Amino acid sequence: MNLLSDPLTLASLIGALVLAGAAIGFLAGVFGVGGGAISVPIFFEIFGALGYPPDVAMPIAVGTSLAVIIPTSISSARGHHKKGTLDVAILRTWAVPILIGVLLGAAIARFAAPVVFQATFVLVASINAVKLLTGGKGWNLSETLPSVLAMRFSGMLIGLVSAIMGIGGGAVSNLFLTLHGVPIHRAISTSAGVGVLIAIPGTIGYIIAGFGRGDLPPGSLGFVSLFAFALTIPTSILTTRFGVTLVHKLSRRALEMAFGSFLVLVAGRFLWAIIS
C-alpha cells in the first residue's frame, strides 16, 4: 500500500477507477452485460500493482465487480424494460436457479486458485466471441426455448459461471438465448435483467467468502473493496443510459460484431495472464 503515499500514483489510481466506471456503465447499456469483463481485469491490475498476490487480487476483483454491477444492471434493466424488449417470463423461470448457482460460485471462490477464474473467463468469452463474429451460422440449437426443467438447469449454470467470472451473466445468458432463437435485441435486454439476479446474491456471497481474512486491502468488506466500489459507481450509472439509447439504434449485425470484438480482447487479456 506504499504506492498510495505518492500523490501522483493516488491520482492515477482514482482516475483509472473513474474511467473504468464510465466504461462499465456504457457496456451495461449496450451489451446487456454488467461490465464485469472490463472491471475484473482493471481491478485485478490495480490490486496487483498495490502489491497483493493473485490469490487475493483475483477474488477481490471479482467480488468488487459484482458489487459494481448491482446499480449498473438495475439501471440497464429499467432502460430496456421501458423499450419493451426485456422478457420478464424468462427472468421468473431463472430467478431461483440463478441464485443457487451464484451461491455455489461464491463458495468456490473462497478456495479456488486464480487460474480457475481466469480460465473460466477465457473459455466462455471465446465461445461467445466466435459465435458472434461468424454471424452465428450453424450455431442455433433450436428456434424455441427448451423445457422449463432445462431452462432452470441452464439458469443454475449461468449463475455458477457468472459468479466465478465476476460478471453480470450477460455474456453467458446472451449465448444461451441466441442459441435458442431469441433475437439479439431481446437477448441483450433480458440479459440486463439477469445481471440483477446475479449481482446481488453474488456480492453477498463474496462478502461472506472473504469475511475474516486478514490479508485483504484496507476498506474491504470480505472480497469487496468499498474504495473501488465508491469511485466507479457515479460514472457507471451516468453512462448506462447512453448505452441503452445506442443499442436500439444499431443493427443486429453491428451489435454482434461489436460484442464479439470486445469479448476477444477480454479473452486475450486473461489468456496472457494464464500463460505468462
Image (cartoon, rainbow, N blue to C red):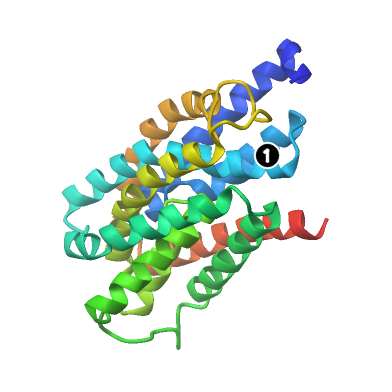
Q: Is residue 11 visible?
A: yes
State which quarter of the image contains the N terminus.
Answer: top right
- Residue drawn 55% across the image and 31% down it: 19
- Residue drawn 32% across the image and 63% down it: 97
Expressed as whole percent of the image width and height from the top left, the position of residue 270 reads 68, 56
The residue sitting at the front extreme is 212
Residue neighbourhood size for the residue with mark 1, other residues' Cα within 10 Å, grouped as few (<14), some (14–19), many (≥20): many
204 above or below 50? below
Apparent side of residue 32 relative to residue 41 in the rendered image (left or right): left
Q: Amino acid at mark 1?
A: Val
Expressed as whole percent of the image width and height from the top left, the position of residue 53 reads 75, 39
Apparent side of residue 211 relative to residue 246 in the rendered image (left or right): right
State which quarter of the image contains the C terminus.
Answer: bottom right
79 above or below 131? above
Expressed as whole percent of the image width and height from the top left, the position of residue 198 reads 37, 51
- In this view of the protein, which residue sits in the foreground, 220 or 199? 220
- In this view of the protein, which residue sits in the foreground, 264 or 68? 68
Q: Is residue 25 visible?
A: no
To which residue does mark 1 refer?
Answer: 56
169 above or below 146? above
- Residue drawn 49% across the image and 29% down it: 229
Expressed as whole percent of the image width and height from the top left, the position of residue 32 reads 37, 54
The residue sitting at the right extreme is 276
Regarding mark 1 in the picture, which secondary structure is present there?
helix
- In this view of the protein, which residue sits in the foreground, 143 or 255? 143
